[in-house]
Amino acid sequence: MTAAPILLEGLEKRWYQRRGARIRCFEGGVGPPLLLLHGFGGAAWNFSELAPLLAGRRLIIPDLPGHGGSSPLPAPSVAGFADVLTAIVEEPVDVVGHSMGGVVALRLAERYPLLVRRLVLAAAAGISSSTRLAEITIALAGLVQPGRIAGRRVGGVARSRLLRKLVFGSFEVSNPAVLTERAVHGFLRGPTMHTDAIGAGLALAADDPRIDLDRVRCPVLVLWGARDRQVPLADGFEYARRLRAPLRVIADCGHLLIGERPEVCARAVLAFTDSR
């Protein structure tokens, strides 16, 4: 049996307490601080492919409340998730938010403008996810938790091209064959630990960040997969238009761009956060 790959190697695990939740966070590296926020149903481990490529940055990668090793908020909300991050971040940071993490990042920038220097929205939720249909879909996903089911067989999924296609091919990525074994473990290990996927999903569905986008003052880069079937590229265009932000589209890439095309994502993040 092949040993499971080490995820977020070289980063130290730390714990924080805020708003009744205990938050697990992975931190390490030297340089300007960069906060990475995962999506709904994910965990800090989602960045296992991207993190090693972000050289020259001090990385801060939490499990959001109810996800991975973090306990849930007593009353989950996207604004509450953003508030929790203030226990972790004590100085201005650049932020990368993937999917739901993008909505949390927008709320952080809106509520605590002095904390966010630059923001990368990577296939950010918040537009399509705030519809009634999306609320029903997210609630069902939180109830069934397909990621938890697949996570119990993560070793087999990582080693089998067929299983990778079954798990990731219909909705998550453009080409499951490009996912490394570490990427598969990074996406599937977290759901086996989740404590409040339903609460987080309903909080996401209830939040429409467009209402307050005019309060986001920091520079923003919108980063999207051209073949994202979960959060459509049209949402990326709307974010770019409303935020007056550049949009970078990654060809032949789906929703999990941070694991499917980590090199391209890393180059975009570093170039944008270096342009002071």
Image (cartoon, helix red, strand yellow):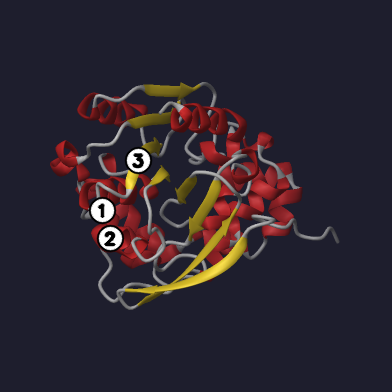
Which numbered disc flags the more N-terminal residue, 2 or 3?
A: 3
Mark 2: amino acid: Leu
Which mark is nearer the camera, 2 or 3? 3
Task: Tell me which residue sits at (68%, 56%) in the image.
Answer: 10
Q: Are marks 1 and 2 in contact (CB under 8 Å)?
A: yes
In space, the residues marked 1 and 2 are separated at their CA atoms by: 5 Å
Q: Which residue is mark 2?
A: 202
Residue designated by label 1 = 205
Say which label, 1 or 3, has the lower sequence index.
3
Corner quadrant of residue 2? bottom right
Distance CA(mark 2)–CA(mark 3) = 29 Å
Q: Residue at x 39, y 49 (%)?
A: 101
| Other residues around mark 3 within 10 Å, as few (<14) / some (14–19) / many (≥20) | some
Relative to 205, say whether 197 is above or below. Answer: below
Report whether 216 appears left or right of 28. left
Q: Which residue is mark 3?
A: 117
Q: Whole-percent x and y of residue 257?
A: 52, 36
Q: Amino acid at mark 1?
A: Ala
Screen quadrant of the N terminus:
bottom right
Q: Between residues 71 and 174, which one lies in front from this camera angle? A: 71
Q: Residue at x 27, y 64 (%)?
A: 80
111, 263: nearer the viewer: 111
Q: Are marks 1 and 3 in contact (CB under 8 Å)?
A: no
Q: Nearer the viewer, residue 240 or 51?
A: 51
- On the image, the x and y values in percent for residue 172 come to 50, 41
Residue density around tag 2, few if under 14, some if 14–19, many if 20 or more, within 10 Å = many
At 54% across and 24% down in the image, what residue appears?
252
Amino acid type, residue under disc 3 in the picture: Arg
Where is residue 240? Give x, y as percent.
Answer: 28, 26
